[in-house]
Image (cartoon, helix red, strand yellow):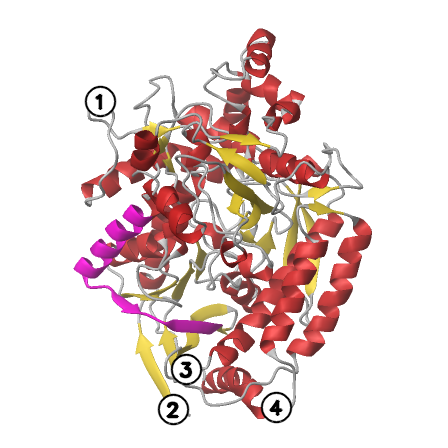
Amino acid sequence: MELEQHEYDVVVVGAGGAGLRAAIEAHESGARTAVVCKSLLGKAHTVMAEGGIAAAMANTYPEDNWRVHFRDTMRGGKMLNHWRMAQLHAQEAPDRVRELEDWGALFDRTPDGLISQRDFGGHRYARLAHVGDRTGLELIRTLQQRTVALGIDVYMECTVTRLLTDNGEITGAFGYWRESGRFVAWQAPSVVLATGGIGKSYKVTSNSWEYTGDGHSLALQAGATLVNMEFVQFHPTGMVWPPSVRGILVTESVRGDGGILKNSAGNRFMFDYIPDFFRKETAETEAEADRWYEDKKNNRRPPELLPRDEVARAINSEVKAGRGTPHGGVFLDIASRRSPEYIRKRLPSMYHQFKELAEVDITAEAMEVGPTCHYVMGGVEVDPDTEAARVPGLFAAGEVAGGMHGSNRLGGNSLSDLLVFGRRAGLAAAEHALKRIDRTHLREDALADAARAALAPFDREGGENPYTVQHDLQQTMHDLVGIIRTEPEMEQALERIAALKERVANLSVEGHRQYNPGWHLALDLPHMLVVGECIARAALERQESRGGHTRDDFPATDAEWARTNLVCSRAPDGSVALTRQPLPRMPAELAEIFEESA
């Protein structure tokens, strides 16, 4: 077998914000570090996070602090977040933003010269540090520039197909070059997963082609566990027209800067969907709650900035009630609220996106938007301080890691999440690798088995077409495990997934290993299928509605489920096993924060 081999202390899989921040920290801790990315360096999904980085810097509202941010995050996640992760995130996010600025990031400014911060859904105060609506792009540019300047090795257009272990510990990773199909292996005692999300398991998604759940599946296969997989966030506002761009994200910044949602009758419908519990919990008094509900124009926390799960469900309800737009969404209108100059200055990417892709001038007319699969709150179960998974030597950060966001992520928390925990994962991975006395070794039988599995689709003739199977999986998840879920539909989804497993085992591809996208998809499909099964099984088990998980047959939240996590593991036969696990208990000093008036 022709095999290219490399040796490092830390290998980071994924070159988004979490991966690059982890690699920088590992390198600066003295570890020989490499980054492996499925696509080109700089083309990370982080770029699509446009609105800003949530951090309680108090530049706009002096009364903001980490305690309020912690409370907002926990409430946004419906209290299912791992309290320690939410605490560390809120406390450390401001330093990570200032660190980015030290490394060359250029943020928008307040009149006083401080980093500008904008409103976003679920945040009590304006706290998103931003660069127009291109914040993710600036974050990646800054981290990428530092990665290159430090001389960290980067393997671009390389796909990892298996994590290698020996005696239950990580020894490295196996993969292939996408251009040539040649196999490559990395020997390393520490691997950091920063592979992002699972959106390509769904038919309509804001996620790009790389998001096939690789990290979730690789971790499960290596012996790690996944938590909170039932919670999938459908961003309220994705493009719905034309069909070629259906699902592409329309940043929450449009609503943060004054955009409002209207149905086909021209009514601003979100006032009909403000939940009583949300109004009461976020208002200091009942009088304030009443003012918020009644003052439809001037309140700085309009209903369009409710948490994303609430807005997505409201849009879904309007469309189902027959009050949707001609193309099955609702209208997002900022043209009637802001001047063309303001829109072009604050939302340049959105202006050009709609102008070029949909021939819509958002300074003059409303956008058609609708929910799109955007983010998975579930991921690898990690230690909150080190991001270590249950497999020694394996770490995870960013969207592939679970626990931080509970049942629903607040907008802007993703970028601060990947900075805070990317740094912590890189630090812990380096410490784990550097304290080892003996070198790790890659077993020849493990390498040979990984190669055989990768080449198996070429050995079959007349098998299943990968593109057909992918279409059927995406349709299954879209129809049966989407925004609104029921027991019969999810049972049907699991039956279809079982049938798809048999079809995936019989995939065949033609041609050679060079430039073969059909082969690439054939290797991605098992990951997508595992992720789909985890989501469906966990969603069927959780008999309540909470955050990104809505059960039509169990519409209320349940106090018992508020104390329970669902954990996925790999059964001996390769199927997904599900267990219940008590939620970590919050210390009294943090619980008191929820009794404070903001």
Mark 4 or mark 3, earlier in chain: 4
- Pointer 3 residue: 515
Real-space CA distance between mark 3 and mark 1, rounded to the nearest whole angstrom = 52 Å
Mark 3 or mark 1, earlier in chain: 1
- The kind of residue on which mark 2 rests is Glu
The residue drawn where x is 58% and y is 65% is: 528
Real-space CA distance between mark 2 and mark 3, rounded to the nearest whole angstrom = 18 Å
Mark 1 or mark 2, earlier in chain: 2
Real-space CA distance between mark 1 and mark 2, rounded to the nearest whole angstrom = 60 Å
Q: Nearer the viewer, residue 437 or 140?
A: 140
- Pointer 2 residue: 2
Q: Which mark is residue 325?
A: none
Helix, strand, or loop for circle 3?
Answer: loop
- The kind of residue on which mark 3 rests is Tyr
- The kind of residue on which mark 4 rests is Arg
- The kind of residue on which mark 1 rests is Pro
Nearer to us of marks 2 and 3 is: 3
- Pointer 4 residue: 460
Quadrant of the rendered image containing residue 51: top left
Real-space CA distance between mark 1 and mark 4, rounded to the nearest whole angstrom = 65 Å
The boundaries of the magenta stretch are 137-162
Mark 2 or mark 3, earlier in chain: 2
